[in-house]
Structures are given as structure tokens and as C-alpha cells.
Amino acid sequence: MKLPLKLLSLGMITMFLVGCIEDKSTEKETSEFKVPVEYYKLDNGLRVILSQDATSPTAIVAVYYNIGFRIEPKDRTGFAHLFEHMMFQGSKNLGKMEFVKLVQQNGGVLNGSTRFDFTNYFEIVPSHKLETMLWAEADRMRGLDISQENLTNQQGVVKNEVKVNVLNQPYGGFPWLDMPQYANTNWYNAHNFYGDLKDLDAANLEDVASFFDTYYSPNNAALSVVGDFDMEETKAWIEKYFGDIPAAELPEQPDISEPRQEEEKEFVKNDSLANKPAIALAYQMPERNTPEYYAMGLLDQILVQGDNSLLAQKLENEKGFTSDVSGGINYLGNMFNYKGPMLWMYDLTHDKETSKEDILTAIDEVMADLDNTLSQEMIDRAIVKIRSQLYDDIGGTFGLGRADLLCSFALFDDDPARINSLEEEFKKITPEVVKRTIEEYLRKSNRTILVVNPLLADNEKTS
């Protein structure tokens, strides 16, 4: 389900390091890097974003639909994910799995995924196959082969995926799938995104047809093309293949807001397959695009990203409780490619000899001292790290990360050019804004703790 958006090239690393150590003029030049963005809409409402990059003879076609886990119908949990699979079962001119064969036989790769706020599909192909991919994506947007045979088959595939990836795995779903169900209160943010097996079985052809007609319409989608292509030729192809697909009447979006969390929550999950305890901590995020949102991005870098992060230093180097502190904003992507409420979260496994209380005491020491140790120098280092991550996202996988952000910003903000202002937004954040963010969003009463109880370890001990 998850896209490989975080691949960093040696050239990118070198550029970041050079940008950090060279003189101010060079730093200014690197900070002025801009992603080319051509943005417009077709008459049917399809958002189109074109971004040229001639560094390799490849092109990416990415189609993002404004439907994800959050707003799938009640009593049809997992339906957004089920439909991701249905999109490969055939369309008017391409039979079952022929879409996949078409891409692969033309030297390309493809994937799809379901996230909190979108479902996406992409192909990376040699540039001269761009028209073919645009035609194929338009063909399945125009209409699917919705049959009982295909539905029954994919219900089985998805249920098996749930069993393999979650139910029969140690720490399955921990914490990315589990934590939203504990930390959030609004059903849309707190239900089982993978889907209850009974709900998956209950899906019928009428559900599938209605879902497709509503959410897989051009006015609920964004199309980005990134790579080596001719601008005018590509615009003509997009109009030719997508222009006459009819728009749909979109339903009113449900309320997905979360109330302010007023008290700390704590839960235990028994795991019969886990052999070590684990713990995850989550905090409700500030609203997107606010100063506090960007400040949380910097605090994420300061607290959990990299070996020099404060929590890694405390829990790994100083205390020796764990060797794997990891976390971030949005475990199914990054801090930019979501729309609704989100959690900042981190997690770790540890030996049974280390108690939960020991870990929380050490964490509280870091958090209590954070306000006192915070400095402009610390913020500047965080900006360098987040700049590196941002360029990682933009440049990874032949530009797939760029396509991802362009489609996300088109869907959520009607402004894909936001991609070029992100770094400046972080640079605006002062120590005062960060301290204000710490006070409101890193308070204990905004914290949810989830502990994994490793039943396998107990069984091994008694056997």
C-alpha cells in the first residue's frame, strides 16, 4: 500500500552538505531551487499539473482521487482500499490485469495505494510511452469492468492482505493502523482503515458502482505528469483522452474534525505474536499550513529524526533502552500529503527488563527540558534536516515524490505551486512560535500512549 517516496541519491546528499557549508551566496542559490509547475483545469474539473524534468528520458503519470480511508462509507470499512484493487480488474479497452501488463511490457513500473485522504495510481515509463499511459489511465477513469466475479475475487485478495500484513504479523498494524483508533474520537478518523472482514464481505455490486461513479470522477481527481515530455503535445493528449469524461455531482464532505484533546489516554494491545514489548506515543497535530504546523515539522526533526535527535540521544545512547526510536508526522506518507487531522507519533521496542515507567520518565525529562534548551541554532539545524527531507521527497524515484506533492497540493489547496514555498515557511518560524507550539501541542493532556503486551514472550517464558 505504501509508496516508496523516500529514496535519497548521493548527488542530493552532496548538494545538501554543500548548501550547509558554503558561503551565503551559494546557500541563497540552492535555496532558490524551484520546481516548474504548470497548473490548469479541464472543463470537466480535472486538475492537471505538468512539471518538466529532462534529467532522464522517463515520464511519470500520477492520478490522485480525493477519496481515502477517512470518508469511506460507514459499515463499509476498508472500502476505499478494496476499490484500489478493483481499479486493476479491467476497463472498457483493457481486460483483467491488462493495465499492469501494458505498463510492464513497455518497460515501466506502477503501483497504487490508499492513504488517509486520497487513493493514488502511478506509472513510471520511458518518455516515448507517455501517451499510452495517459490513454490507459483515462480508459479506467471512464469506466471499470464491475462484475460480481471481479468483486468476489478482490474481496478475497484484500481479506488475505489484512490477514498477512496485520492479523498474522507480530506488531501487525502497530502503530500506524492502531493508534488512530485509540487517539481519535471522530469515527472517520478512528475506524479500522484496513477494514473489518465482515464489512468487506458485505460490499455488493451496487456499492462498487456507486462508489466509482461518485469518487472516481474527473472533478474529484488530480493528474500530474512529471519528467521528460513536450508541454504542448502532452496538453493535447490530456485533452484528447480525459476531456470528454463527464463530471459527477460530488457529495458534501463529512465533518472530519477532531476536538481538542483534554486528557492523556493510555491503552494496551495484547499481541500473541510479539516477543518484545513496544510503546508508541502520539500527539494531535496543529491544523495544516498554520505557523504551529510548520513548527511541529521542526520539532519532529529535533525530537525523533536522525541519530542526533533528542529522544534518540536519551533513549538509545544515554539510557540504552532501545535501538530503534522512529516516528514522524503521517506514517503513511509525509507531513505534506494529507488533509484532515493528523498525529505526530513515535514508537520503539524494548526489552522486558525495561519498564514502561522507565521509558516514560526518560521521555518526560526530554520534554520538560525542551523549552529551556530550545535555541535558534537548534531550529536552524532542524531546517537543514527538513530541507534535506523535502528535497528527498521531491527528487526520489525519478520524481515520484514531486508528483505526489503536486497532486496533493492540487487536491487539498488548489495550489500545487505550494511546493516551492515550503522551505520559506519553515524559515519564518521563530523560537517563540516553537515554544508556543510546545506548550499547546506537546502537553501531556494531548498525548496518547499505546503499549504492546508481547504474549509470545510470556508463552516462551513459561514453556
Image: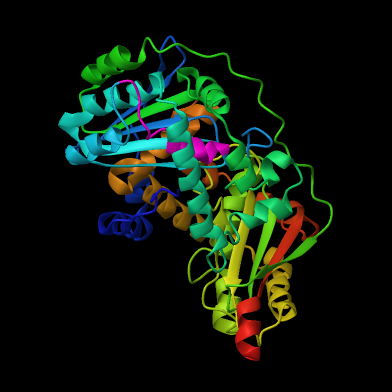
Name the one closer to the observer, 282 or 300: 282
Which residue appears farthest toward the right when viewing the image?
262
Q: Between residues 37 and 74, which one lies in front from this camera angle?
A: 74
Residue 435 visible, this orientation: no
Relative to 437, residue 81 above or below: above
Q: Is residue 319 left or right of residue 233?
A: right
Q: Residue at x 57, y 30 (%)?
A: 204
Is residue 384 a member of the stretch shown in magenta?
no
Q: Please provide percent x and percent y for residue 341.
A: 66, 42
Q: Is residue 340 left or right of residue 226?
A: right
Residue 33 in the image: x percent, y percent? Answer: 34, 40
- First to last magenta residue range: 79-92
Q: Position of residue 185 (x, y in %)?
A: 76, 46
Within the image, what quadrant is residue 78 found in? top right
Q: Observer-nearest residue: 409 or 437? A: 409
Question: Is residue 54 found left or right of 348 in the rendered image?
Answer: left
Which residue is located at x 61 percent, y 82 percent? 457
Residue 65, position as x, y percentages in the image: 48, 29
Q: Residue furthest front?
A: 149
Who's the residue at 47% across and 44% down the image? Answer: 423
- Quarter in which the C terminus is drawn: bottom right
